[in-house]
Image: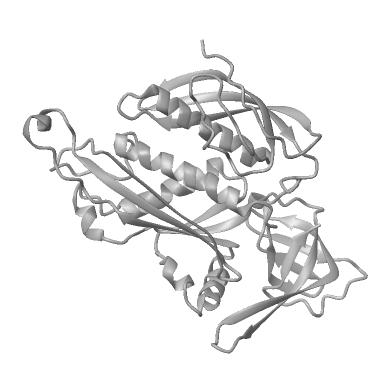
């Protein structure tokens, strides 16, 4: 039986209310190493608990099993007193672990309370060297990768929900120049999203094939390096960017034609490792978003009624109230679009909702004459 794991914290808040949370994480089993898979699955579950409930760990120390170490601190805003593994189950090449964690929530850190999910544009992934896809005949991998990222976001993110577009790829470098605001504005109007997540595979090369006696039992390995960039679709600002990489066994023969959308691929050692990378990236992305407010935009207006680009998927409900922020765009000295926001006391109330939009009506005392398309609305 797995024993209780106690985490000792350096508490950053003098008083808090404890709350037990049950959450499940999973990880791939590499080279039969159950201990490493257990450690990774618990980290995944613990990260999910943090993102879902808010929190930070200043320092932590593992008492049993070497499951966590002092370098694996999560940079969120809650404190954990105790963690218990309640169930462990192996499913093929993956280990699933359910934990109960004693989470001490700080009432002051309430940015997750009544939080809305922001729509996120997810294009087809880019593979920088497409010649590397020839091995295994993986030409359809970019679409399969974006679909898998969308699935992980849907199941794991508490900050965003994906709007998947498999017909287009968007290179991150277009947001590294003086015209990034114009590029973001074009995509913002085209996609009606608040963020753009841009996956770029920088390396999928095969390692050198084993030779000599080791070739009889060692499998060839394949590299994987993924850059994830999160761009604010209103400003064009890159608010988070991270590289992830590994080198893992390639379970398929040299002449095999691998289907990137198949269960066979995603349950292989290499596919499982990619899933682990994606899960870690999405937790990192949610952490980077922190307490940023989810901004709705006015996408249509008629009289005293406006339509916002947030709806049921974002968590908007009938009766919710939003305050309007006027947005003004103007070019700077190099021609880059700059945005200036002006707060107002104008308030709208949601009265109709679809999956991706909401219709709102201005209060009787407010004058909506100054409200324009692309103006911003923030939930009260």
Q: Quadrant of residue 294?
A: bottom right
Give left or right: position of 110 versus 28.
Answer: right
Residue 263 showing in the rendered view = yes
Residue at left offset 41%, top offset 56%: 227
Residue 377 is situated, as x and y percent measured from the top left of the image, at 74, 65
Which quadrant is the C terminus positioned in? bottom right
Relative height, residue 58 to residue 363 (above, below): above
Q: Residue 337 appears at what percent x and percent y?
A: 59, 81
What residue occupies the far left of the structure in this picture? 212
Query: Is 355 in front, or is 185?
Result: 185
- Residue 183 against residue 295 in the figure, above or below: below
Residue at image point 71% right, 59% down = 358
Quadrant of the rendered image containing residue 350: bottom right
x%, y% of residue 207?
20, 45
Using the image as rendered, state which of residue 315 and residue 35 is in the foreground.
35
Reply above or below: 258 against 323: above
Q: Quadrant of residue 212?
A: top left
Residue farthest toward the top in the current orientation of the protein: 1
* The one of 246 and 306 positioned closer to us in this rendering: 246
By what rule are the colours in the image chosen? Answer: one colour
37 with respect to 188 (left or right): left
Q: Residue furthest bottom?
A: 333
Above/below status of 269 relative to 278: above
Query: Exactly how many numbered labels are in the figure?
Result: 0
Q: Is residue 95 visible?
A: no
Q: Is residue 114 left or right of residue 236?
A: right
Residue 74 position in % (x across, y down) = 58, 40
51 vs 344, nearest the viewer? 51
């Amino acid at each position: 039986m797995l024993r209780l794991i106690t985490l000792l914290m350096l508490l950053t808040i003098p008083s808090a209310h404890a709350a037990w949370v049950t959450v499940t994480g999973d990880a791939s089993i590499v080279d039969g190493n159950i201990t490493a898979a257990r450690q990774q699955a618990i980290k995944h579950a613990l990260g999910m608990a943090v993102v879902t409930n808010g929190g930070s760990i200043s320092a932590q120390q593992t008492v049993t099993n070497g499951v966590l170490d002092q370098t694996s601190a999560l940079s969120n805003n809650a404190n954990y007193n105790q963690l218990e593994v309640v169930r462990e189950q192996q499913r093929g090449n993956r280990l699933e672990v359910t934990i109960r964690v004693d989470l001490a929530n700080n009432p002051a850190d309430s940015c997750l309370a009544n939080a809305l999910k922001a729509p996120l544009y997810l294009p087809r992934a880019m593979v920088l060297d497409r010649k590397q896809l020839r091995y295994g005949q993986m030409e359809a991998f970019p679409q399969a990768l974006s679909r898998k990222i969308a699935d992980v976001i849907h199941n794991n993110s508490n900050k965003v929900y994906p709007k998947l577009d498999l017909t287009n790829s968007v290179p991150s470098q277009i947001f590294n120049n003086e015209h990034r605001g114009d590029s973001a504005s074009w995509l913002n109007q085209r996609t009606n999203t608040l963020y753009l997540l841009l996956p770029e595979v920088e390396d999928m090369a095969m390692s050198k094939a084993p030779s000599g006696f080791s070739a009889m039992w060692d499998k060839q390995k394949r590299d994987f390096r993924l850059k994830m960039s999160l761009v604010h679709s209103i400003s064009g600002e890159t608010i988070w960017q991270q590289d992830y990489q590994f080198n893992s066994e390639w379970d398929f023969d040299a002449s095999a034609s691998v289907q990137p959308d198949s269960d066979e691929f995603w349950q292989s050692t290499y596919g499982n490792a990619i899933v682990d990378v994606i899960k870690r990236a999405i937790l990192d992305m949610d952490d980077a978003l922190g307490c940023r407010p989810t901004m709705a935009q006015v996408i249509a207006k008629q009289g005293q009624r406006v339509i916002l680009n947030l709806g049921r998927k974002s968590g908007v409900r009938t009766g919710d109230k939003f305050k309007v922020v006027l947005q003004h765009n103007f070019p700077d000295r190099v021609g880059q679009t700059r945005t200036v926001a002006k707060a107002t006391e104008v308030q709208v109330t949601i009265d109709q909702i679809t999956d991706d939009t909401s219709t709102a009506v201005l209060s009787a005392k407010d004058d909506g004459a100054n409200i324009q398309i692309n103006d911003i609305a923030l939930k009260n």
